[in-house]
């Protein structure tokens, strides 16, 4: 019996760290890229339109560099360029397995990626192409979480799937507190009241104001993307 996805258009938010193999000196693991590409292909085969927002933390963290004395705007622009490298790596992995992909960048660099144009992005999704959004919002002082929230609302996505290193949202750090309680579902207002760090405040406000649900889940198991799309109880659902 064919599986029916709960969501028809998604934004998958990946950290740059998701592309790095634990303990490896390489910033990008071809094996992990291939695994992610296959997971995305499986989701797309369900008839789901997939957009991806990817971070650059495996290569460069603008905020960390600014704390060490670098000009914040310059450091952030460097971080945006790191996301372009990651986006191109994921595009290569997807196209190697036959998934037509477009990279759209918020900073123009015509030799490597299309400029972000909303109508063109929508057309790509409708044509069954994966769209990877890179270079953040094109502005310093904004995280790729904010990019995910912004693009998801712009393209009319049904949900943001936020891939992390933990299997959901807890009321305390599960690494330091063995008694931490995991939430299966939580409302925006309760997450805000409990000061739970779902996304940075700008991204979270954008999602809350526009009633954009967020699923926070563990990326170490690539099949979790498909499970989340099918509406299975994976991770934590944040909604209104």
Image (spheres, grey):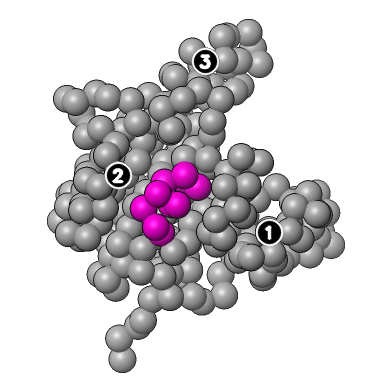
Instruction: Pinpoint residue 99: horizontal percent, then vertical percent.
Output: 19, 55
Range of the magenta residues?
148-157
- Return the mark for residue 118: 2
Mark 3 → mark 2, Cα distance in angstroms: 25 Å
Q: Is residue 53 left or right of residue 96?
A: right
Mark 1 vs 3: CB contact within 8 A: no
Q: Quadrant of the N terminus?
A: bottom left
Q: Is residue 175 left or right of residue 227?
A: right
Q: Where on the picture, by quarter, is residue 98?
A: bottom left
Instruction: Pinpoint residue 176: horizontal percent, then vertical percent.
Output: 80, 49
Label 2 residue SS: helix
Which residue has dot 1 on it?
Answer: 188
Foreground disc of the pair 1, 3 = 1
Residue 90 seen in the figure: no
Label 1 residue SS: helix
Residue 121 seen in the figure: yes
Specify the principal SS of the magenta part.
Answer: helix
Against 80, residue 75 (above or below) is: above
């Amino acid at each position: 019996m064919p599986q029916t996805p709960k969501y028809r258009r998604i934004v998958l938010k990946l950290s740059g760290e998701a592309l790095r193999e634990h303990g490896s000196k390489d910033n990008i693991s071809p094996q992990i890229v291939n695994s992610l590409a296959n997971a995305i292909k499986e989701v797309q085969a369900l008839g789901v339109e997939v957009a991806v927002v990817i971070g650059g933390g495996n290569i460069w963290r603008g905020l960390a560099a600014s704390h060490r004395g670098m000009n914040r705007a310059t450091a952030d622009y460097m971080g945006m360029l790191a996301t372009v490298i990651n986006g191109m790596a994921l595009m290569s992995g997807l196209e190697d397995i036959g998934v037509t992909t477009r990279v759209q960048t918020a900073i123009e660099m015509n030799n490597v990626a299309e400029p972000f144009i909303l109508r063109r992005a929508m057309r790509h999704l409708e044509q069954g192409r994966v769209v990877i959004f890179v270079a953040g919002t094109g502005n310093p002082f904004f995280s790729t979480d904010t990019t995910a929230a912004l693009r998801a609302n712009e393209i009319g996505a049904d949900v943001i799937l936020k891939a992390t290193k933990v299997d959901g949202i807890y009321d305390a750090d599960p690494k330091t507190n063995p008694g931490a309680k995991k939430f299966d579902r939580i409302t925006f207002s309760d997450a805000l009241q409990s000061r739970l760090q779902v996304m940075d405040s700008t991204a979270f406000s954008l999602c809350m104001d526009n009633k954009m649900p967020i699923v926070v889940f563990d990326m170490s198991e690539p099949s979790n993307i498909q499970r989340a799309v099918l509406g299975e109880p994976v991770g934590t659902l944040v909604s209104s």
